[in-house]
Amino acid sequence: MDFEAISDLHLLTAKPVIYAFNVDEEGLNNSDLQSQLTELVSPAKTVFVCAKLEEELKGLSENDAKELLESYGVKETGLAKLIHAAYDTLGLQSYLTAGEKEVRAWTIHKGWTAPQAAGVIHSDFERGFIAAQIVDFNDLVAAGSEVKARENGKIRTEGKTYIMQPNDVVEFRFNV
């Protein structure tokens, strides 16, 4: 189908679809069942959740919830799976900004440059973009602080052509 020719019609049938299948506890790890259902709705994305398990997880602490998920052989909740599928289907990703007062996630399109990502915070950031100080989230956590990450050489300066990555923690330099 020529999606470009019909894009201005905004047809619901032309929109990407995610199928969320509510399966029982055995279905969460039944690769044959999941393969059959995925094939049935292909090329749409599929997510398999167990509503009963999700209900049980709702009232648990983070550690207890993690333990329960592991007992079912599942790594993340159905909600988390659905969020990841939605971001992927819509071509989105997040990056982080961190300061003394707050840490915040910003949603952008995959493939956006640092100035475009800065513009999500404020249009002046994009217009006056100079550079981005970037550290990978995992490197920052491993270092324990921004100062230690800088000492370990994990913080780098990127320019206007840098393509943002999902684990980026960024401080934008700008002048307006």
Image: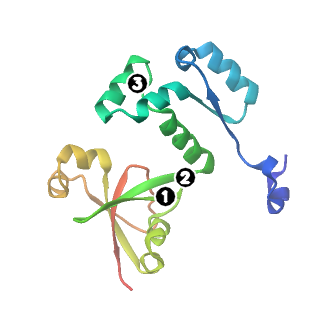
Residue under numbered circle 2:
92
Residue under numbered circle 3:
69
Residue 153 locus on image (x, y percent): 20, 53
Q: Nearer the viewer, mark 3 or mark 1?
A: 3
Q: Which structural element holds mark 2?
A: strand
Are discs 2 and 3 less than 8 Å apart at CB?
A: no
Amino acid type of the residue that numbered disc 3 sits on in the rendered structure: Leu
Of residues 98 and 133, the one nearer the viewer is: 98
Taking 165 as reference, is 101 left or right? left
Amino acid type of the residue that numbered disc 1 sits on in the rendered structure: Thr
Residue under numbered circle 1:
107
Residue ID at (84%, 50%): 2
Give the mark, 2 or 3, whose residue is nearer the N terminus. Answer: 3
Of residues 110 and 106, the one nearer the viewer is: 106
Of residues 74 and 35, the one nearer the viewer is: 74
Residue 101 locus on image (x, y percent): 24, 65
Residue 60 locus on image (x, y percent): 35, 32
Q: Quadrant of residue 17?
A: top right
Residue furthest to the bottom: 176
Are discs 2 and 1 less than 8 Å apart at CB?
A: yes
